[in-house]
Amino acid sequence: MSVRILLAVADPDLAGEVTDLAREDPDLEIVQAAVDVGAVSAALGREAIDVVLLHEGIAPLPVMELARDLTTSFPNAAFVLLVEEAPPELLRSAIQAGARDVVTRPLSLDELRTSVNSAADLARATQTKLEGESAERVGGATIAVAGAKGGVGATTLATHLALSSAQAGRSTCLVDFDLQAGDVRGIFDIPQGRSLTDLIDVAAEVSGAQLMEALYRHESGLSILLSPEDGESAEEIGAERARGLMGAVKFAFEVVVIDLGTVVNDATAVAVELADEALVVTTPDVPALRAANRLLMLWKRLQVRDEQNTLTVLNRASRRSEVQPDLARRILLAPLLDTTVPADFRALEAAVNTGVPARLADGALRSALADLAVEMGLVEEQRQGRRSLLRSEAGQVTAELVGMTALITTVLLLLWQIALVGYTFVLADHAAREGARAMAVGEEAEAAALADVPGAWRDDTEVRTGDERVEVRMDVPVVVPGLSAPFALRAREGTVDEDG
Ligand SMILES: Nc1ncnc2c1ncn2[C@@H]1O[C@H](COP(=O)(O)OP(=O)(O)O)[C@@H](O)[C@H]1O
Ligand SMILES: [Mg+2]
């Protein structure tokens, strides 16, 4: 494999000299010669170049600065500086600028060959790495989630994987491919409307615009492609249509999470085949583990996916259950994820009942679902981020607690005040009656009325005696007996002068 060289030399004599030398080695191919900076970047943008032979006279810029710019902009190529003289300071700044080597004039073939070849090795290693990374990026991540059997939590896990990915800022689509029993609509409480039904006729060749029309966009940023409302149209989605749909969704989104349900049919088989990862959800009990293995074997027989390329995860795990992850790992034919999702119906309750999956109570289940997204490669592990999230949630809890306390205090004060009014009424009534009784037998009515009134009330009590009646006016205390009051209660009691 010959080394593709870009000659960046302004001086035509020097360029000719290097070209002649390179001709002597069939493995050195000078792809292009550039005489100024603009031509260098243009050639690098257009051609696949391994090594740039950069002469110090190429300026206007100081050559080191140019080298630094070019190495950052074109990491695919390696740079070799060609200089008249190479004092130690120059070597040092060349290394800092990212040059691979420095050669001086007069140039020998040997020197040129050695330097260019070692630079090319580095360039190729970088190219391979960058290609790998971009392939990963372009392919995005498509995760197909299947349940070993009904009710194990495939939809729950698929939903939370997709939400985590969307919340991490990646364009994400959740596809409900559980064609007969899809319940994503219910989980998000989405009204009737757009679904896969809209795409059935065009499925084999869905355009981006048609796909966008059929999607539901959730406030979390997640796009959702719902399963058909009726089971019959689901049957029309065969392998070819499924392939078209998968292609369109994968093209439009960075991350695609597909809820397959438990049924294996042509459509779901295609989805499993085209997905980057397939995840089988199971619970830690023998029937579910057996069902998981049956599904894995079925996929293998259908040649859609090998069990070693499939992942499994335990949902609704509990420390009390007989089957612990170690045992499950031995039973399952496919690798088991380290993350185990605990059983916690209470934590899910609010989320399930309100149709807002993100409303998950804090706790082990929530953090397991977050870990699952990390282990599946959808979300980067962000300890810092998570901690600060927790902190902000803690702040919210404190604020809610303060609000609650104020409310409770107000209610208690109100009840207390009602009790005070009631008690004042009883006191006034009793005082009036005592006063009237005393008056009836010719005793001092006022003294008798006040006799039983507690000290805190006495100062604010007025007793008036009239013709055959005693009236007691008592201020109602506010909150604390004795505190001045804006309103008063009156009690009247009539009497008959027994002597008369
Ligand atoms: N880890 C868990 N703990 C408690 N309940 C769960 C858990 N995972 C799922 N569930 C509940 O189990 C039921 C079935 O879950 P679902 O995700 O619909 O299963 P599937 O899609 O496999 O049929 C739902 O009511 C869901 O809320
Ligand atoms: Mg389901």
Image: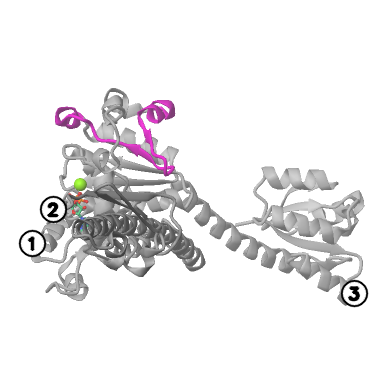
Q: Is residue 252 above or below residue 397?
A: above
Is 167 displayed left or right of 417 in the figure?
right
> N-terminal of the two: label 3 or label 2?
3
Dot 3 falls on a residue whose secondary structure is loop
At label 2, the amino acid type is: Lys
Q: Which residue is mark 1?
A: 287
Question: Residue shown at 90%/49% (left/top)?
Answer: 12
**As rendered, which of 262 and 68 lies closer to the eye?**
262
Dot 2 falls on a residue whose secondary structure is loop
Question: Residue shown at 14%/72% (left/top)?
Answer: 321
**As rendered, which of 300 and 397 lies closer to the eye?**
397
Question: Residue shown at 23%/52% (left/top)?
Answer: 154
Dot 1 falls on a residue whose secondary structure is helix
Question: Residue shown at 88%/59% (left/top)?
Answer: 56
**As rendered, which of 294 and 7 lies closer to the eye?**
294
What stretch of residues is rendered in magenta?
207-236
- State yes or no: Cβ of the residue under disc 2 lies below 8 Å from any atom of ligand 1: yes
